[in-house]
Image (cartoon, rainbow, N blue to C red):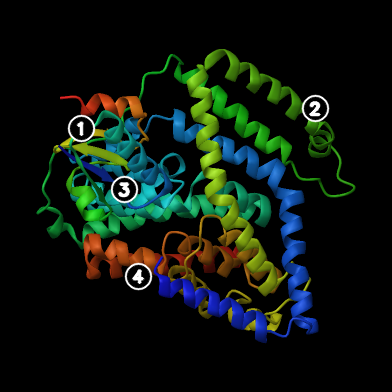
Amino acid sequence: MKERTKLLIIAGVFLAAYFIPWDHGLIRQSGLEAFMMLREYAREHMLTCLIPAFFIAGAIAVFVSQASVLKYFGAQANKLLSYSVASVSGTILAVCSCTVLPLFAGIYTRGAGIGPATAFLYSGPAINVLAITLTAKVLGWQLGLARAIGAILFAFVTGILMSIIFRKDDAARTAGQIYVPDSGDSQRTLLQDSLYLLTMVLILIFASFARPAPGASGFWPMIFSYKWYITAVLLVALAFMVKTWFKKDERIAWVESTWGFMKQIFPLLIGGVLVAGFLLGRPGHPALIPEQYVQSLLGGNSLRANLFASVAGALMYFATLTEIPILQGLLGSGMGKGPALALLLAGPALSLPNMLVIGSVMGVKKTAVFCGIIVVMSTIAGMVYGSFAG
Amino acid sequence: MEIKVLGPGCSRCKNVEDIVKEAVAETGVDAQIEKVTDIMKIASYGVFGTPAVVIDGEVKSVGKVPRKEEVKKWLKP
Protein backbone atom coordinates (compact mmCIF):
# COMPACT_ATOMS: atom_id res chain seq x y z
CA MET A 1 0.00 0.00 0.00
CA LYS A 2 1.31 3.45 -0.92
CA GLU A 3 1.86 6.05 1.79
CA ARG A 4 -0.59 8.37 0.09
CA THR A 5 -3.39 5.76 0.14
CA LYS A 6 -2.78 5.22 3.85
CA LEU A 7 -3.10 8.97 4.44
CA LEU A 8 -6.32 9.08 2.42
CA ILE A 9 -7.81 6.19 4.40
CA ILE A 10 -6.94 7.79 7.75
CA ALA A 11 -8.33 11.16 6.58
CA GLY A 12 -11.53 9.43 5.42
CA VAL A 13 -12.03 7.64 8.74
CA PHE A 14 -11.39 10.91 10.59
CA LEU A 15 -13.90 12.86 8.51
CA ALA A 16 -16.52 10.13 8.94
CA ALA A 17 -15.97 10.07 12.71
CA TYR A 18 -16.17 13.86 12.84
CA PHE A 19 -19.20 14.54 10.69
CA ILE A 20 -21.55 11.54 10.80
CA PRO A 21 -24.44 12.31 13.19
CA TRP A 22 -23.87 9.25 15.37
CA ASP A 23 -26.58 10.18 17.87
CA HIS A 24 -29.26 10.44 15.19
CA GLY A 25 -31.98 7.85 15.68
CA LEU A 26 -31.55 6.30 12.24
CA ILE A 27 -27.79 5.81 12.67
CA ARG A 28 -28.31 4.28 16.12
CA GLN A 29 -30.91 1.90 14.71
CA SER A 30 -28.60 0.95 11.82
CA GLY A 31 -25.63 0.37 14.12
CA LEU A 32 -27.76 -1.83 16.35
CA GLU A 33 -28.99 -3.79 13.30
CA ALA A 34 -25.37 -4.40 12.21
CA PHE A 35 -24.57 -6.14 15.49
CA MET A 36 -27.93 -7.90 15.75
CA MET A 37 -27.27 -9.43 12.34
CA LEU A 38 -23.77 -10.42 13.41
CA ARG A 39 -25.25 -12.12 16.48
CA GLU A 40 -27.71 -13.98 14.28
CA TYR A 41 -24.82 -15.35 12.21
CA ALA A 42 -22.82 -16.24 15.30
CA ARG A 43 -25.75 -18.04 16.93
CA GLU A 44 -27.49 -19.64 13.98
CA HIS A 45 -24.92 -20.29 11.29
CA MET A 46 -21.36 -20.25 12.63
CA LEU A 47 -21.10 -23.44 14.72
CA THR A 48 -23.46 -25.80 12.97
CA CYS A 49 -22.99 -24.76 9.36
CA LEU A 50 -19.85 -22.77 8.65
CA ILE A 51 -17.35 -24.66 10.81
CA PRO A 52 -18.26 -28.09 9.34
CA ALA A 53 -18.24 -26.53 5.86
CA PHE A 54 -14.72 -25.21 6.43
CA PHE A 55 -13.53 -28.66 7.45
CA ILE A 56 -15.09 -30.12 4.30
CA ALA A 57 -13.46 -27.46 2.12
CA GLY A 58 -10.14 -28.13 3.84
CA ALA A 59 -10.45 -31.87 3.24
CA ILE A 60 -11.35 -31.37 -0.41
CA ALA A 61 -8.38 -29.07 -0.96
CA VAL A 62 -5.94 -31.56 0.57
CA PHE A 63 -7.28 -35.02 -0.23
CA VAL A 64 -9.12 -34.79 -3.55
CA SER A 65 -6.58 -35.26 -6.28
CA GLN A 66 -6.54 -32.19 -8.48
CA ALA A 67 -4.49 -33.96 -11.10
CA SER A 68 -7.31 -36.41 -11.78
CA VAL A 69 -9.60 -33.51 -12.66
CA LEU A 70 -7.10 -31.31 -14.46
CA LYS A 71 -6.26 -33.93 -17.07
CA TYR A 72 -9.66 -33.24 -18.61
CA PHE A 73 -8.52 -29.69 -19.40
CA GLY A 74 -5.60 -30.65 -21.65
CA ALA A 75 -5.55 -29.79 -25.36
CA GLN A 76 -6.19 -33.42 -26.33
CA ALA A 77 -9.05 -33.98 -23.91
CA ASN A 78 -12.46 -35.09 -25.09
CA LYS A 79 -14.50 -31.93 -25.65
CA LEU A 80 -17.77 -33.01 -24.09
CA LEU A 81 -16.00 -34.36 -21.02
CA SER A 82 -13.99 -31.19 -20.84
CA TYR A 83 -17.10 -29.01 -20.68
CA SER A 84 -18.86 -31.24 -18.17
CA VAL A 85 -15.88 -31.42 -15.86
CA ALA A 86 -15.32 -27.66 -16.13
CA SER A 87 -18.91 -26.95 -15.15
CA VAL A 88 -18.85 -28.98 -11.95
CA SER A 89 -15.19 -28.86 -10.97
CA GLY A 90 -15.61 -25.55 -9.18
CA THR A 91 -16.85 -27.57 -6.22
CA ILE A 92 -13.47 -29.16 -5.70
CA LEU A 93 -10.96 -26.87 -7.35
CA ALA A 94 -11.89 -23.37 -6.44
CA VAL A 95 -12.40 -21.83 -3.10
CA CYS A 96 -10.20 -18.80 -3.64
CA SER A 97 -9.45 -16.63 -6.62
CA CYS A 98 -5.76 -17.57 -6.46
CA THR A 99 -6.65 -20.91 -8.04
CA VAL A 100 -9.35 -19.73 -10.42
CA LEU A 101 -7.58 -17.10 -12.50
CA PRO A 102 -4.23 -18.86 -13.13
CA LEU A 103 -6.06 -22.07 -13.98
CA PHE A 104 -8.35 -20.17 -16.34
CA ALA A 105 -5.37 -18.58 -18.09
CA GLY A 106 -3.70 -21.99 -18.31
CA ILE A 107 -6.71 -23.74 -19.83
CA TYR A 108 -7.23 -20.88 -22.25
CA THR A 109 -3.68 -20.58 -23.57
CA ARG A 110 -2.34 -24.12 -23.27
CA GLY A 111 -5.22 -26.46 -22.63
CA ALA A 112 -8.66 -27.24 -23.90
CA GLY A 113 -9.37 -23.72 -25.17
CA ILE A 114 -11.77 -20.88 -24.66
CA GLY A 115 -14.95 -22.93 -24.10
CA PRO A 116 -13.86 -25.05 -21.13
CA ALA A 117 -11.79 -22.14 -19.81
CA THR A 118 -14.76 -19.77 -19.61
CA ALA A 119 -16.99 -22.56 -18.29
CA PHE A 120 -14.54 -23.09 -15.47
CA LEU A 121 -14.09 -19.36 -14.92
CA TYR A 122 -17.80 -19.05 -14.34
CA SER A 123 -18.45 -22.19 -12.32
CA GLY A 124 -15.42 -21.86 -10.04
CA PRO A 125 -16.51 -19.13 -7.65
CA ALA A 126 -20.23 -19.83 -8.08
CA ILE A 127 -20.51 -23.42 -6.90
CA ASN A 128 -17.87 -23.99 -4.26
CA VAL A 129 -18.98 -25.94 -1.19
CA LEU A 130 -18.92 -23.00 1.20
CA ALA A 131 -21.04 -20.72 -1.01
CA ILE A 132 -23.76 -23.30 -1.73
CA THR A 133 -23.97 -24.50 1.88
CA LEU A 134 -24.32 -21.03 3.36
CA THR A 135 -26.80 -19.93 0.69
CA ALA A 136 -29.02 -22.89 1.48
CA LYS A 137 -28.71 -22.35 5.24
CA VAL A 138 -29.33 -18.60 5.32
CA LEU A 139 -31.55 -17.98 2.30
CA GLY A 140 -33.41 -21.29 2.17
CA TRP A 141 -32.73 -24.57 0.39
CA GLN A 142 -34.79 -23.58 -2.67
CA LEU A 143 -32.48 -20.68 -3.48
CA GLY A 144 -29.41 -22.79 -2.63
CA LEU A 145 -30.53 -25.51 -5.03
CA ALA A 146 -31.49 -23.01 -7.74
CA ARG A 147 -28.06 -21.43 -7.37
CA ALA A 148 -26.23 -24.75 -7.70
CA ILE A 149 -28.24 -25.95 -10.71
CA GLY A 150 -28.20 -22.53 -12.36
CA ALA A 151 -24.44 -22.19 -11.96
CA ILE A 152 -23.66 -25.61 -13.45
CA LEU A 153 -26.06 -25.09 -16.35
CA PHE A 154 -24.78 -21.57 -17.02
CA ALA A 155 -21.17 -22.68 -16.98
CA PHE A 156 -21.90 -25.33 -19.60
CA VAL A 157 -23.92 -23.02 -21.87
CA THR A 158 -21.52 -20.07 -21.53
CA GLY A 159 -18.58 -22.29 -22.46
CA ILE A 160 -20.33 -23.71 -25.54
CA LEU A 161 -21.50 -20.25 -26.70
CA MET A 162 -18.05 -18.74 -26.29
CA SER A 163 -16.40 -21.53 -28.26
CA ILE A 164 -18.98 -21.20 -31.07
CA ILE A 165 -18.66 -17.41 -31.29
CA PHE A 166 -14.87 -17.45 -31.23
CA ARG A 167 -14.15 -20.78 -32.93
CA LYS A 168 -11.71 -19.25 -35.45
CA ASP A 169 -9.41 -17.78 -32.81
CA ASP A 170 -9.22 -21.05 -31.02
CA ALA A 171 -7.28 -22.72 -33.79
CA ALA A 172 -4.37 -20.30 -33.39
CA ARG A 173 -3.46 -21.33 -29.88
CA THR A 174 -0.19 -23.03 -29.13
CA ALA A 175 -0.23 -26.36 -27.43
CA GLY A 176 2.67 -27.03 -25.12
CA GLN A 177 3.84 -28.93 -22.11
CA ILE A 178 1.48 -28.50 -19.17
CA TYR A 179 2.16 -29.12 -15.50
CA VAL A 180 -0.58 -30.14 -13.10
CA PRO A 181 -0.28 -30.40 -9.33
CA ASP A 182 0.99 -33.87 -8.44
CA SER A 183 -1.51 -36.16 -6.86
CA GLY A 184 0.53 -37.44 -3.95
CA ASP A 185 0.30 -41.13 -3.15
CA SER A 186 -2.25 -42.15 -0.57
CA GLN A 187 -2.91 -45.49 1.05
CA ARG A 188 -6.66 -44.99 1.15
CA THR A 189 -9.11 -46.43 -1.31
CA LEU A 190 -11.61 -44.28 -3.16
CA LEU A 191 -14.33 -45.82 -0.98
CA GLN A 192 -12.59 -44.69 2.20
CA ASP A 193 -12.14 -41.15 0.87
CA SER A 194 -15.80 -40.98 -0.17
CA LEU A 195 -17.04 -42.32 3.18
CA TYR A 196 -14.91 -39.76 4.98
CA LEU A 197 -16.29 -36.85 2.94
CA LEU A 198 -19.84 -38.24 3.13
CA THR A 199 -19.65 -38.45 6.93
CA MET A 200 -18.67 -34.80 7.11
CA VAL A 201 -21.47 -33.76 4.77
CA LEU A 202 -23.97 -35.73 6.90
CA ILE A 203 -22.66 -34.02 10.06
CA LEU A 204 -23.24 -30.69 8.37
CA ILE A 205 -26.78 -31.66 7.34
CA PHE A 206 -27.86 -33.01 10.73
CA ALA A 207 -26.14 -30.38 12.87
CA SER A 208 -27.86 -27.60 10.97
CA PHE A 209 -31.17 -29.45 10.57
CA ALA A 210 -33.91 -26.82 10.64
CA ARG A 211 -36.70 -26.90 13.21
CA PRO A 212 -39.80 -28.20 11.39
CA ALA A 213 -42.95 -26.09 11.29
CA PRO A 214 -44.88 -26.24 14.59
CA GLY A 215 -47.62 -28.85 14.52
CA ALA A 216 -45.94 -30.90 11.81
CA SER A 217 -45.81 -34.61 12.49
CA GLY A 218 -44.12 -37.66 11.06
CA PHE A 219 -40.62 -38.05 9.68
CA TRP A 220 -39.03 -34.58 9.85
CA PRO A 221 -39.90 -33.71 13.47
CA MET A 222 -38.65 -37.15 14.49
CA ILE A 223 -35.30 -36.51 12.80
CA PHE A 224 -35.18 -33.09 14.39
CA SER A 225 -35.67 -34.47 17.90
CA TYR A 226 -32.83 -36.95 17.42
CA LYS A 227 -30.49 -34.67 15.48
CA TRP A 228 -27.87 -34.23 18.22
CA TYR A 229 -27.70 -37.99 18.87
CA ILE A 230 -27.22 -38.64 15.16
CA THR A 231 -24.59 -35.92 14.95
CA ALA A 232 -22.74 -37.34 17.96
CA VAL A 233 -22.66 -40.84 16.42
CA LEU A 234 -21.39 -39.40 13.14
CA LEU A 235 -18.69 -37.42 14.96
CA VAL A 236 -17.47 -40.60 16.68
CA ALA A 237 -17.41 -42.36 13.30
CA LEU A 238 -15.45 -39.48 11.79
CA ALA A 239 -12.94 -39.49 14.65
CA PHE A 240 -12.46 -43.23 14.12
CA MET A 241 -11.86 -42.78 10.36
CA VAL A 242 -9.42 -39.91 10.89
CA LYS A 243 -7.53 -41.90 13.50
CA THR A 244 -7.18 -45.14 11.57
CA TRP A 245 -7.11 -44.18 7.89
CA PHE A 246 -4.94 -41.08 7.94
CA LYS A 247 -1.27 -40.59 8.66
CA LYS A 248 -0.17 -37.91 11.10
CA ASP A 249 1.10 -35.45 8.48
CA GLU A 250 -2.14 -35.85 6.51
CA ARG A 251 -4.15 -34.91 9.58
CA ILE A 252 -1.92 -31.87 10.08
CA ALA A 253 -2.31 -30.85 6.43
CA TRP A 254 -6.10 -31.14 6.75
CA VAL A 255 -6.27 -28.94 9.85
CA GLU A 256 -3.82 -26.45 8.35
CA SER A 257 -5.80 -26.02 5.14
CA THR A 258 -9.07 -25.69 7.11
CA TRP A 259 -7.44 -23.05 9.29
CA GLY A 260 -6.16 -21.32 6.13
CA PHE A 261 -9.71 -21.00 4.78
CA MET A 262 -11.04 -19.77 8.11
CA LYS A 263 -8.34 -17.12 8.43
CA GLN A 264 -9.03 -15.94 4.92
CA ILE A 265 -12.82 -15.94 4.95
CA PHE A 266 -14.04 -15.17 8.51
CA PRO A 267 -12.83 -11.53 8.66
CA LEU A 268 -14.37 -10.81 5.25
CA LEU A 269 -17.65 -12.45 6.20
CA ILE A 270 -17.89 -10.59 9.51
CA GLY A 271 -17.22 -7.30 7.67
CA GLY A 272 -19.85 -8.20 5.08
CA VAL A 273 -22.46 -9.04 7.73
CA LEU A 274 -21.81 -5.76 9.58
CA VAL A 275 -22.09 -3.70 6.39
CA ALA A 276 -25.23 -5.53 5.26
CA GLY A 277 -26.79 -5.12 8.71
CA PHE A 278 -25.91 -1.43 8.88
CA LEU A 279 -27.26 -0.60 5.42
CA LEU A 280 -30.21 -2.97 5.14
CA GLY A 281 -30.99 -4.48 8.55
CA ARG A 282 -32.44 -7.87 9.39
CA PRO A 283 -35.70 -8.89 7.72
CA GLY A 284 -38.51 -6.84 9.27
CA HIS A 285 -36.13 -4.30 10.82
CA PRO A 286 -35.46 -1.11 8.84
CA ALA A 287 -31.94 0.35 8.74
CA LEU A 288 -30.11 3.09 6.83
CA ILE A 289 -31.46 2.43 3.31
CA PRO A 290 -35.25 2.93 3.25
CA GLU A 291 -37.16 -0.16 2.21
CA GLN A 292 -39.15 1.59 -0.50
CA TYR A 293 -35.93 2.20 -2.51
CA VAL A 294 -35.14 -1.50 -2.49
CA GLN A 295 -38.75 -2.37 -3.31
CA SER A 296 -38.98 0.06 -6.20
CA LEU A 297 -35.67 -1.06 -7.76
CA LEU A 298 -35.61 -4.77 -6.99
CA GLY A 299 -39.09 -5.71 -5.82
CA GLY A 300 -41.46 -7.96 -7.75
CA ASN A 301 -40.29 -9.92 -10.74
CA SER A 302 -40.24 -7.40 -13.59
CA LEU A 303 -37.68 -7.46 -16.41
CA ARG A 304 -36.28 -4.19 -15.09
CA ALA A 305 -35.75 -5.51 -11.56
CA ASN A 306 -34.08 -8.69 -12.83
CA LEU A 307 -31.86 -6.83 -15.28
CA PHE A 308 -30.88 -4.29 -12.63
CA ALA A 309 -29.99 -7.10 -10.20
CA SER A 310 -27.82 -8.96 -12.70
CA VAL A 311 -25.99 -5.86 -13.98
CA ALA A 312 -25.36 -4.63 -10.42
CA GLY A 313 -24.20 -8.12 -9.43
CA ALA A 314 -21.87 -8.32 -12.41
CA LEU A 315 -20.18 -5.01 -11.62
CA MET A 316 -19.98 -5.30 -7.84
CA TYR A 317 -17.18 -7.10 -6.09
CA PHE A 318 -18.29 -9.58 -3.45
CA ALA A 319 -15.58 -11.03 -1.29
CA THR A 320 -16.09 -14.79 -0.79
CA LEU A 321 -19.49 -15.45 0.84
CA THR A 322 -20.34 -11.79 1.56
CA GLU A 323 -23.00 -11.89 -1.17
CA ILE A 324 -25.13 -13.94 1.24
CA PRO A 325 -25.64 -11.45 4.13
CA ILE A 326 -26.09 -8.65 1.60
CA LEU A 327 -28.74 -10.62 -0.23
CA GLN A 328 -30.39 -11.55 3.06
CA GLY A 329 -30.66 -7.84 3.88
CA LEU A 330 -32.02 -7.04 0.42
CA LEU A 331 -34.60 -9.84 0.55
CA GLY A 332 -35.71 -8.62 3.97
CA SER A 333 -36.15 -5.12 2.58
CA GLY A 334 -38.43 -6.27 -0.20
CA MET A 335 -36.27 -7.64 -3.04
CA GLY A 336 -38.07 -10.23 -5.17
CA LYS A 337 -36.97 -13.89 -5.27
CA GLY A 338 -36.24 -13.72 -9.00
CA PRO A 339 -33.89 -10.72 -8.82
CA ALA A 340 -32.21 -12.42 -5.84
CA LEU A 341 -31.32 -15.44 -7.96
CA ALA A 342 -30.23 -13.16 -10.83
CA LEU A 343 -27.83 -11.40 -8.48
CA LEU A 344 -26.52 -14.69 -7.08
CA LEU A 345 -25.83 -16.02 -10.56
CA ALA A 346 -24.16 -12.91 -11.98
CA GLY A 347 -22.52 -11.72 -8.78
CA PRO A 348 -19.67 -13.87 -7.49
CA ALA A 349 -18.34 -14.85 -10.92
CA LEU A 350 -18.00 -11.31 -12.21
CA SER A 351 -16.78 -8.01 -10.81
CA LEU A 352 -15.06 -4.96 -12.22
CA PRO A 353 -11.55 -5.87 -10.95
CA ASN A 354 -12.10 -9.43 -12.15
CA MET A 355 -13.12 -8.22 -15.64
CA LEU A 356 -9.85 -6.29 -15.94
CA VAL A 357 -7.80 -9.43 -15.29
CA ILE A 358 -9.92 -11.53 -17.65
CA GLY A 359 -9.56 -8.76 -20.24
CA SER A 360 -5.78 -8.94 -20.00
CA VAL A 361 -5.93 -12.67 -20.72
CA MET A 362 -8.43 -12.92 -23.57
CA GLY A 363 -8.93 -9.36 -24.79
CA VAL A 364 -11.68 -6.78 -24.45
CA LYS A 365 -14.03 -8.18 -27.08
CA LYS A 366 -14.21 -11.71 -25.70
CA THR A 367 -14.53 -10.39 -22.15
CA ALA A 368 -17.45 -8.17 -23.18
CA VAL A 369 -19.22 -11.10 -24.86
CA PHE A 370 -18.57 -13.32 -21.83
CA CYS A 371 -20.05 -10.73 -19.44
CA GLY A 372 -22.96 -10.08 -21.80
CA ILE A 373 -23.89 -13.77 -21.98
CA ILE A 374 -23.87 -14.06 -18.18
CA VAL A 375 -25.94 -10.91 -17.60
CA VAL A 376 -28.56 -11.95 -20.15
CA MET A 377 -28.80 -15.53 -18.84
CA SER A 378 -28.95 -14.40 -15.20
CA THR A 379 -31.80 -12.05 -16.05
CA ILE A 380 -33.73 -14.81 -17.79
CA ALA A 381 -33.09 -17.29 -14.97
CA GLY A 382 -34.24 -14.70 -12.44
CA MET A 383 -37.51 -14.15 -14.31
CA VAL A 384 -38.18 -17.87 -14.64
CA TYR A 385 -37.39 -18.57 -10.98
CA GLY A 386 -39.36 -15.52 -9.84
CA SER A 387 -42.48 -16.66 -11.68
CA PHE A 388 -42.30 -20.02 -9.82
CA ALA A 389 -41.22 -18.80 -6.39
CA GLY A 390 -43.22 -15.61 -6.41
CA MET B 1 20.71 -20.03 -10.57
CA GLU B 2 17.42 -18.41 -11.39
CA ILE B 3 14.37 -19.13 -9.23
CA LYS B 4 10.90 -17.97 -10.12
CA VAL B 5 7.94 -18.12 -7.77
CA LEU B 6 4.68 -17.98 -9.74
CA GLY B 7 1.52 -16.74 -8.07
CA PRO B 8 -0.89 -13.83 -8.35
CA GLY B 9 -0.42 -12.72 -4.75
CA CYS B 10 -2.49 -14.97 -2.52
CA SER B 11 -1.27 -15.81 0.95
CA ARG B 12 -0.06 -19.27 -0.05
CA CYS B 13 2.10 -17.72 -2.78
CA LYS B 14 3.75 -15.37 -0.28
CA ASN B 15 4.35 -18.38 1.93
CA VAL B 16 6.23 -20.12 -0.87
CA GLU B 17 8.32 -17.03 -1.56
CA ASP B 18 9.39 -16.88 2.09
CA ILE B 19 10.24 -20.58 2.17
CA VAL B 20 12.35 -20.28 -0.99
CA LYS B 21 14.17 -17.23 0.38
CA GLU B 22 14.95 -19.02 3.64
CA ALA B 23 16.13 -22.11 1.80
CA VAL B 24 18.44 -20.04 -0.39
CA ALA B 25 19.84 -18.16 2.61
CA GLU B 26 20.41 -21.37 4.57
CA THR B 27 22.14 -23.29 1.78
CA GLY B 28 24.11 -20.25 0.65
CA VAL B 29 23.67 -20.89 -3.10
CA ASP B 30 23.98 -17.97 -5.47
CA ALA B 31 20.44 -17.43 -6.77
CA GLN B 32 18.14 -14.68 -7.93
CA ILE B 33 14.56 -15.02 -6.75
CA GLU B 34 11.86 -13.44 -8.85
CA LYS B 35 8.16 -13.26 -8.04
CA VAL B 36 5.96 -13.56 -11.14
CA THR B 37 2.47 -12.17 -10.60
CA ASP B 38 1.28 -11.51 -14.15
CA ILE B 39 -1.40 -14.07 -15.06
CA MET B 40 -0.35 -14.40 -18.70
CA LYS B 41 3.30 -14.91 -17.77
CA ILE B 42 2.28 -17.56 -15.26
CA ALA B 43 0.22 -19.32 -17.94
CA SER B 44 3.16 -19.20 -20.37
CA TYR B 45 4.99 -21.69 -18.13
CA GLY B 46 2.08 -24.10 -18.63
CA VAL B 47 1.39 -24.47 -14.94
CA PHE B 48 -2.23 -25.34 -14.11
CA GLY B 49 -2.18 -24.09 -10.57
CA THR B 50 -0.39 -21.73 -8.27
CA PRO B 51 1.77 -21.26 -6.28
CA ALA B 52 4.42 -22.82 -8.50
CA VAL B 53 8.21 -22.86 -8.34
CA VAL B 54 10.38 -22.76 -11.48
CA ILE B 55 14.16 -23.21 -11.19
CA ASP B 56 16.30 -22.49 -14.26
CA GLY B 57 13.28 -22.94 -16.52
CA GLU B 58 12.28 -26.27 -15.00
CA VAL B 59 8.92 -26.55 -13.21
CA LYS B 60 9.58 -28.01 -9.76
CA SER B 61 6.27 -27.79 -7.93
CA VAL B 62 2.72 -26.82 -8.85
CA GLY B 63 -0.27 -25.91 -6.72
CA LYS B 64 1.21 -26.56 -3.31
CA VAL B 65 3.45 -25.07 -0.67
CA PRO B 66 6.65 -27.15 -0.76
CA ARG B 67 8.51 -27.95 2.46
CA LYS B 68 11.83 -26.20 3.03
CA GLU B 69 13.77 -29.49 2.85
CA GLU B 70 12.30 -30.14 -0.61
CA VAL B 71 13.37 -26.72 -1.83
CA LYS B 72 16.88 -27.28 -0.46
CA LYS B 73 17.09 -30.52 -2.44
CA TRP B 74 16.22 -28.67 -5.67
CA LEU B 75 18.93 -26.10 -4.93
CA LYS B 76 21.71 -28.71 -4.79
CA PRO B 77 23.62 -28.96 -8.07
Mark sitting on residue B29: 1
- Which residue bears the numbered disc 4? A372
Question: Judging from the image, what secondary structure is the residue with disc 3 in?
Answer: loop
Q: Residue at x 63, y 77 (%)?
A: A299
User: Which percent across, then down, holds residue A377?
Assistant: 42, 65
Q: Which residue is mark 2?
A: A229
Dot 1: what SS? loop
Give the residue displayed 66% in from the left and 65% down from the top: A274
Whether discs 3 and 4 lie on one chain: the answer is no
The chain holding disc 2 is A
> Where's residue A132, x and y in %?
56, 49
Asked if the residue under mark 2 is in contact with the one under mark 4, i.e. CB atoms within 8 Å, the reply is no
Quarter-of-image position of residue A336: bottom right
Marks 4 and 2 sit apart, C-alpha to C-alpha, by 50 Å
- For badge 3, the amino acid type reads Gly
Horizontal arrangement in the rendering, residue A52 relative to residue B39 (left or right) = right
Q: Amino acid at mark 4?
A: Gly
Image location (x, y in percent) of residue B24: 27, 35
Residue A43 or residue A349, whichever sits in front: A43
Disc 3/disc 4 C-alpha distance (Å): 29 Å
Pointers 3 and 1 within a single chain? yes
Q: What is the spatial separation of the Cα atoms under label 2 and label 3, in whole angstroms? A: 45 Å
Camera-side mark, 3 or 4 = 3
Amino acid type of disc 2? Tyr
- Tell me which label, 4 or 2, sits earlier in the chain: 2
Residue density around tag 3, few if under 14, some if 14–19, many if 20 or more, within 10 Å: many
Residue A180 lies, with reference to residue A333, above or below; the image says above
The chain carrying label 3 is: B
Q: Amino acid at mark 1?
A: Val
Spatial distance from mark 4 to mark 1, Cα to Cα? Answer: 51 Å
> Which residue, given by chain and number where applicable, does mark 3 sit on?
B7
